[in-house]
Amino acid sequence: MAKLLPVLLFLLASFLIAAPSRSEPSLSRGDTAGPASGPMAHTFSIVARDPKTGEMGVAVQSHWFSVGSLVSWAEAGVGAVATQSIVEVSYGPKGLALMRAGKSAPEALKELLTQDEQRDVRQVAMVDALGQVAAWTGRKCIPAAGDQQGGQFSVEANLMSNDRVWPAMKTAFEAAEGDLADRMLAALDAAQAAGGDIRGKQSAAILIVSGERSAEPWKGKLIDLRVEDSPRPLEELRRLVGVQRAYRYADQGDAFVSLGKIDDAMKAYARAAELQPANNELAYWRAVGLWNAGKKPEAIAAFRKVFARDRRWAALTPRLVPVGLLAATPEELKKILGRLS
């Protein structure tokens, strides 16, 4: 028996220390210390950087309420993080802090995993401002679970109906066209089409930031949308992305007006209206912008269309004059409202 003891110890050590997968930092993968702790956000997600624009983001769907409030983290010019499975939320802010301080995504993830005795129940992915990616799928994540990486992106999933989900995400993202939001949404759609979360679907989120670092990082947040609870979260998320784009064009139009770039403003307003033709809010402020830009006949026509759909906007209009948002005399205001004396 004494002669067999060294052999038994060697076999036991080999069992407890498994070799990490290709995408994981080189860390010991022994048993999780103590019971698993943290909120449960079993899900599929993608973290990615657009090499053309430098934009970075996270997109996610899950059968878990308000998944975006736990999983998705990003900071302009720094990176993006998805933290899921049995979630240690601090991987998000701490991962961003490490990348902000100069660590690469692989370095940041390895450092955080080293400090986490419960890393075997975690699933985490990161991308940094240079497009370097890192991912970890702990061996105690609920199957089907795994991750794959491509050029400047990573897809990851756990508690899936099958092991085809994350490869389908990778293929879809690489084949998709459009901007970063379009491509990440395509990856989520492909995951769902491949079987998705074994429990179904409930919430989704997308967070995209600029590639330019700023002392005011909130200004670099380009898209930050969440569907907290819905029977069709991906459909609703895609609709919200469309609304977000329309409002961004409207904001651009306002900015062009303030700079005196009227032609550019009209193009931006037209694009906003094209994306959301029934949105009275956008149509109304476009009319205000047209008026203040000196396009008064066009503005009056635009005002009248909005007023015909909802007279509350007509009641609002006189209130804009004393606060300086609408440069109109009393007689001009009557023309806008259609009450010529």
Image (tube, rainbow, N blue to C red):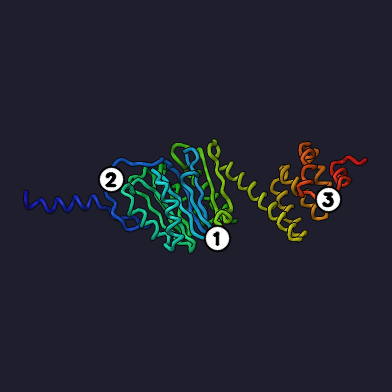
Give neighbour class at mark 1: few <14, some 14-19, many 20+ (Cα, 10 Å).
some
Q: Residue at x 70, y 46 (%)?
A: 276
Q: Amino acid at mark 2?
A: Ala
The first of marks 3 and 2 along the sequence is: 2
In the picture provided, is 17 more to the left or to the right than 48?
A: left
Q: Amino acid at mark 3?
A: Glu
**Vertical relation: 64 (above or below) 184:** above
Out of 286 and 98, give the one closest to the viewer. 98
Can the viewer see residue 206 in this picture? yes
Measured Cα–Cα span from mark 3 to mark 2: 69 Å
Q: Secondary structure at mark 3?
A: helix
Residue linked to disc 2: 33
Disc 3 + disc 1, Cβ < 8 Å: no
Residue linked to disc 1: 214
Residue 240 picture quarter: top right
**Vertical relation: 192 (above or below) 74:** above
The first of marks 3 and 1 along the sequence is: 1
The first of marks 1 and 2 along the sequence is: 2
Horizontal and vertical percent for residue 156? Answer: 43, 50
Q: Amino acid at mark 1?
A: Ser
Horizontal and vertical percent for residue 183? Answer: 55, 53
In the picture provided, is 59 more to the left or to the right than 12?
A: right
Give neighbour class at mark 2: few <14, some 14-19, many 20+ (Cα, 10 Å).
few
Q: Which mark is residue 298?
A: 3
